[in-house]
Image (tube, rainbow, N blue to C red):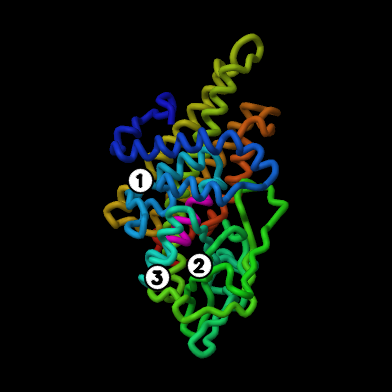
């Protein structure tokens, strides 16, 4: 964030290491991502394997995990990396967070030593890409209704079903798939080369176009007993992974918002309307002031939640507060910035409409706003109102 946007001296809350991580992520975004993003978004294609290896070389994949080749950095450092990468594009941050906070975290948290040693070093280096199969065509906010099932057949497991809206699915080397068993919901580590597994890419997207999104199809996928994640039983496993991913979104959404605001301020300073810059008008400055206040509040909230996570005291409803507030404010900022650019705001020459389109997806993935409202409501009242 430029000094002019950092109205409350957020930098004073950060360690030297966190500032260095943020700077490295910003350089990667500026030098590697921004020049190509308009083309990637237009063509809906990305060099996912190249990017994964480059991100891995920088230590950004699973960077908040320890051991197995992971960087072992703190939550705030990880969050700041997400912020800078999403300032380039939400799809890029999705690649990072699905790899590190969903697929890698599931194996790191719930897997056997054999599973960890087989996959985590390669995934942290970007040499293997992972995806996370929980959402189904008819079951998003209600994962308990999943139809994907796993049945015992001798010592093996046989999986059948499908998953939908899976980031990285078509380029993944390994999928963490959640399925219903006679023993409740369980997770499985599924090499994507396994017979019966396929991952057709979802096309014609209007959002997250610079990201690989897929369906997962499991047709009698036979796995050995060692594919089961031994330490995850029930929905607490996948929901724990989702909380990890939501934490990155709390920071990331503020990156998209910041990029929109920086773009709008720069544009308004150069755009002359009635013989003076657009930024010299009171109404424009009022918009900037309101957006900057919300941006700074959102970043302060993210850093505070990161400090709670460092201490091990971060609760799920606090993650919901961060995700609900920051994504909601980010999309409001993107829309307001678009009005300042007027017709130019819809042009691919500027990133604002791309961010706005992406944030429409961020608003509803990893828990819709309504789900997070109900999580917070349950915390406030003691009553679960999900049904």
**Is residue 117 shown above or below 297?**
below
Upstream in sequence: badge 2 or badge 1: 1
Which secondary structure lies at badge 3?
loop
- Disc on res. 222: none
Locate residue 66, reporting x and y percent: 32, 57
Q: Are marks 3 and 2 in contact (CB under 8 Å)?
A: no
Q: Is residue 17 left or right of residue 173?
A: left
Residue holding disc 2: 176
Locate residue 164, reporting x and y percent: 62, 64
- Seen from the viewer's position, the closer of residues 3 and 218 is 218
Locate residue 248, reporting x and y percent: 44, 50
Comparing marks 2 and 1, which lies closer to the viewer? 2
- Seen from the viewer's position, the closer of residues 384 and 135 is 135
How crowded pointer 1 is (Cα within 10 Å; few <14, some 14-19, many 20+) is rated as many
- Seen from the viewer's position, the closer of residues 98 and 259 is 98
Upstream in sequence: badge 3 or badge 2: 3
Tell me the quarter of the picture where residue 13 sits.
Answer: top left
In whole angstroms, how far apart are the C-alphas of marks 3 and 2?
10 Å
For the question of whether residue 377 can be seen, the reply is no
Quadrant containing the C terminus is bottom right
- Disc on res. 76: 1
Q: Is residue 378 left or right of residue 88?
A: left
Magenta residues span: 94-104
- Disc on res. 111: 3
For the question of whether residue 285 can be seen, the reply is yes
Secondary structure that dominates the magenta span: helix
How crowded pointer 3 is (Cα within 10 Å; few <14, some 14-19, many 20+) is rated as many
């Amino acid at each position: 964030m430029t000094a002019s946007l950092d109205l409350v001296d957020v930098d004073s809350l950060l360690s030297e290491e966190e500032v260095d991580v943020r700077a490295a992520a910003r350089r990667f975004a500026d030098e590697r991502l921004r020049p190509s993003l308009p083309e990637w978004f237009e063509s809906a294609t990305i060099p996912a394997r190249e990017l994964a290896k480059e991100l891995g070389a920088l230590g950004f994949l699973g960077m908040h995990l320890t051991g197995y080749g992971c960087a072992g950095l703190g939550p705030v450092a990880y969050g700041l990396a997400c912020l800078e990468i999403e300032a380039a594009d939400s799809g890029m941050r999705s690649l990072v967070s699905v790899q590190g906070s969903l697929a890698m975290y599931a194996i790191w948290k719930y897997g056997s030593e054999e599973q960890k040693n087989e996959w985590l070093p390669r995934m942290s280096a970007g040499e293997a890409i992972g995806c996370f199969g929980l959402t189904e065509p008819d079951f998003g906010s209600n994962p308990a209704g999943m139809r994907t099932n796993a049945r015992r057949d001798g010592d093996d497991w046989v999986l059948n079903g499908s998953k939908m809206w899976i980031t990285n699915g078509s380029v993944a080397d390994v999928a963490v798939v959640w399925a219903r068993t006679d023993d409740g919901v369980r997770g499985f580590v599924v090499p994507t080369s396994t017979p019966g597994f396929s991952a057709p890419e979802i096309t014609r997207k209007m959002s997250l176009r610079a990201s690989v999104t897929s369906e997962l199809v499991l047709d009698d996928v036979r796995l050995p007993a060692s594919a089961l994640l031994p330490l995850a039983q029930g929905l607490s496993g996948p929901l724990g992974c989702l909380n990890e991913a939501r934490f990155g979104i709390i920071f990331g959404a503020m990156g998209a918002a910041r990029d929109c605001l920086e773009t709008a301020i720069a544009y308004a300073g150069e755009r002359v309307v009635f013989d003076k810059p657009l930024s010299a008008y009171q109404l424009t400055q009022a918009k900037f002031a309101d957006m900057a206040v919300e941006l700074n509040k959102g970043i302060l909230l993210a850093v505070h939640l990161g400090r709670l996570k460092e201490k091990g005291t971060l609760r799920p409803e606090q993650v919901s507060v961060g995700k609900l507030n920051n994504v909601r404010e980010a999309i409001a900022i993107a829309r307001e910035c678009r009005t300042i650019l007027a017709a130019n705001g819809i042009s691919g020459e500027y990133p604002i409409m791309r961010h706005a389109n992406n944030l429409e997806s961020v608003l509803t993935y990893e828990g819709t706003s309504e789900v997070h409202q109900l999580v917070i409501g349950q915390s406030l009242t003691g009553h679960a109102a999900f049904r």
